[in-house]
Image: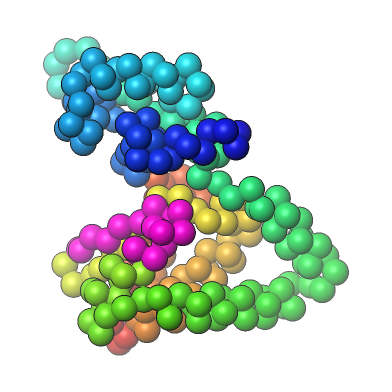
Amino acid sequence: MASLYHRLDNSPRGQIIKLIQRYGPLGIKEFRQELGLSDTAVRQQLRTLMSEGLVRTMLSERSGPGRPSQMYELTAEARNLFACYCEDLALNLYNELLFDQGPDVVDTLLERVGAKLAGQYQHQVKGRVLDDRVRSFASVLDSKGIMSDVTRQADVIMLHEYNCPYHELAAEHREICEMEQDMMAQVLNADVELTLCMMDGHANCSFAVKNKS
């Protein structure tokens, strides 16, 4: 698997993988528009990714007359490219702590870990206005391999993460998601609410960020 990490660079194949990870299944037209390549060049890249077991085809649901269109989605093997291979260690350590020390001690440790992470991020996040801080934070996350971006919904700033830094751990222990939310609130000095979560089957984790009430 390590040999596949170069697929996440800015080569056409790396961009295709990141586009699907961010937006979900896409068709040839969307790849052409995003990459500025011809249909033939896009199909060539997709064929290579399919031969490597990283991309597979699916049929979209029909939204009108005619046949369903062919879309391309990531396989489980491709999604593993976004995983951190220290997760097995983290999960085993966490479970041993729960067994040995109990949930109350682990909850206290999680608060301390979240506060330490917040302190590390705070030195890197710039901006006096909340919108600027959220965008700066998203850039910091992106630089650490956590695909992130920011949108607006009325008076709420939405921070989206497209791959989970603690996927295996959070899948078994949802309190990790709470730690992430609390950490963000400390970093941004704002109210933060997790509104969508990949652990619930959504394509991304979305956090609603507001000025403190």
Q: Is residue 145 magenta?
A: yes
Tell me where the magenta segment starts and ends, as one range. 138-153
Q: Is residue 50 visible?
A: yes
Residue at horizontal 40%, vertical 41%?
A: 9
Instruction: Relative to 129, say whether 10 is above or below.
Output: above
Residue at horizontal 50%, vertical 21%?
A: 52
Instruction: Relative to 99, say whether 82 is above or below.
Output: above
Tell me residue 70's x, y (percent): 29, 18
Q: Residue furthest bottom?
A: 213
Quadrant in the rendering for residue 32: top left
Report the quarter where the N terminus lies.
top right
- Pick whichever, 136 or 94, lies toward us: 136
Tell me residue 72's x, y (percent): 35, 25
Residue at horizontal 23%, vertical 74%?
A: 131
Tell me residue 26's x, y (percent): 29, 30
Report the quarter where the C terminus lies.
bottom left
Residue at horizontal 77%, vertical 67%?
A: 98
- Pick whichever, 137 or 190, lies toward us: 137
Colour mode of the rendering: rainbow
Please give left or right for residue 25 compared with residue 95 in the image: left
Quadrant in the rendering for residue 25: top left
